Image: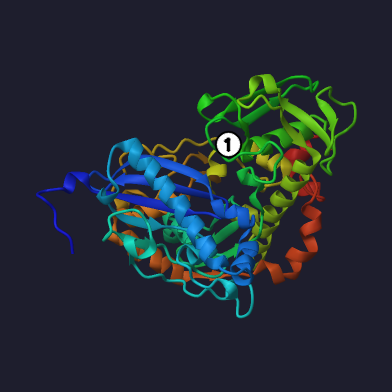
Amino acid sequence: IDYEPGDMTAGSYGLALDIGTTTVALSLIDLNKNEVLGAKATYNQQMSFGDDVISRIIYAENETGGLEKLNRVVRETVNWLISELVKEKGIENKDILALEVAGNTTMNHLFLSLPPGYIRKEPYLPTANFLPDLKGKEIGINIHSEGIVSFCPNVSSYIGGDVTAGILASGMDEKGEISLLIDLGTNGEMVLGNKDFLISAACSAGPAFEGVGIKSGIRAMEGAVENIQISADGKKVKYTTIGNKPPAGICGSGLVDAVAELFKDGFLDRKGKFILESSSLIRESEEGKEFLLVPGKETVNKKDIVLSEADISTLIRSKGAIYLGASVLLEEMGYQFSDLKKIYLAGMFGTYLDIEKAIIIGLLPDLPRTFVQDNNATYEMSEQKLPEFSQTKVRGLAREKFVFLGNSAISGAKLCLLYGEARNKVREIAKKTTYLELSVNPKFMNEYSATLFLPHTNIDLFPSVKKLLNI
């Protein structure tokens, strides 16, 4: 119990938090006005202990004080983001009364110092899926000491609160049509279903989509090269950056663009290898062949922004996991991609993704994609007033079957922060969602190698790409 020196409702704020394996994102919301005031994101500092959830679980189990270190680092990351938003908006930490967390299962465990070991070994179960409400002071988070920290529930070891929040944000669980939600992040989570059923799966796509493990890679932030066009003769590169800032590196969408451009114009073969002497911008480096995208004289740090064959190989493995994971999930339920009414693309990487380029490299299925403007769309709910909960079911920009959701974990967490109805709904979603384990699925294991080509070994799966290449 606390007291207020008079009416303080004008200074009541909440936070929506997405704890991802690679990126941690935070939005500040005015609880009185239902208005998003600002947002920040940064790399998860746990990455110094491993790029993926399995390596961090092993570290937590095997290293002395490992779990405590991982917990401390993620709390420091979150508290740093809070301090940046508080300073920027001229408020105080004690004005933040609530925090809604939408993290993946492992990140939720590490955030609360829960033993994560059985996520990766028998019986392959989280310590908890439905996490209790806690006070900020109980877990070392710098909001009001009595402020409540709540969690979107997990489904399984690899389907966490970020996914249940994403389902909530998309509204796919209330529709009769069959839809697919794909979170284009490190863990490659996906959900198939409608109002009658929801089945989920996850495939380890790796952090390439978030710029990690890429020679010139950075996350989707101001200055990240997000769009690339390469002239037919391979001598000129046009690019745009997020926020129109000087280039600092290349993010996931730029990586997809670059590979697609090089492939369709004949500078890459279907294995992702450069074709020698096809462009004057292809050169040898100590690590192997690379393509010069942006010369150092144009960049923030005066270093060339390049795309290497190793980068391309990393991207091909990531896109292959996503495509095959979705394909196997549909097949197990007796569906094909053509049966889908919508494919929801979640994650900040998806916000900037060019659908055409994603299909060219084989990341997304070759489906109709004529541009459709949805007048009810709100495209990434930031810096704007939030609608009533009953009006939040449709958001994003649509390309017929493809719908961009942006960071759906944050969008769902915002809804849970503001509406009791949403908090009840996300719990229902978690209870309703089942899980398919792809790591033991024979089809996934046997067919993965077929996806390690541009766009795929079976070019007939991508008729528009086949036509583009005149094959």
Badge 1 marks a residue whose secondary structure is loop
- Farthest-out residue, front: 64
Measured as percent of width and height from the top left, residue 389 is found at: 31, 52
Give the camera-side residue of 196 and 65.
65
Quadrant position of the N terminus in the picture = bottom left
The part of the image, by quadrant, that contains residue 443 is bottom right
Residue 386 shown left or right of residue 442 in the figure: left
Measured as percent of width and height from the top left, residue 7 is found at: 11, 48
The part of the image, by quadrant, that contains residue 377 is top left
The residue drawn where x is 62% and y is 42% is 368
Give the camera-side residue of 471 and 45.
45
- Residue 35 higher or lower than 332, as above or below: above
The residue drawn where x is 63% and y is 40% is 252
Residue 327 shown left or right of residue 380 in the figure: right
- Residue 456 higher or lower than 327, as above or below: above
Identify residue type, mark 1: Thr
Q: Which residue is mark 1?
A: 370
The residue drawn where x is 9% and y is 49% is 6
Quadrant position of the C terminus in the picture = top right
The residue drawn where x is 65% and y is 60% is 203
- Farthest-out residue, right: 276
Measured as percent of width and height from the top left, residue 79 is found at: 41, 51
Residue 466 shown left or right of residue 222 in the figure: right
- Residue 285 higher or lower than 431, as above or below: above
The part of the image, by quadrant, that contains residue 11 is top left
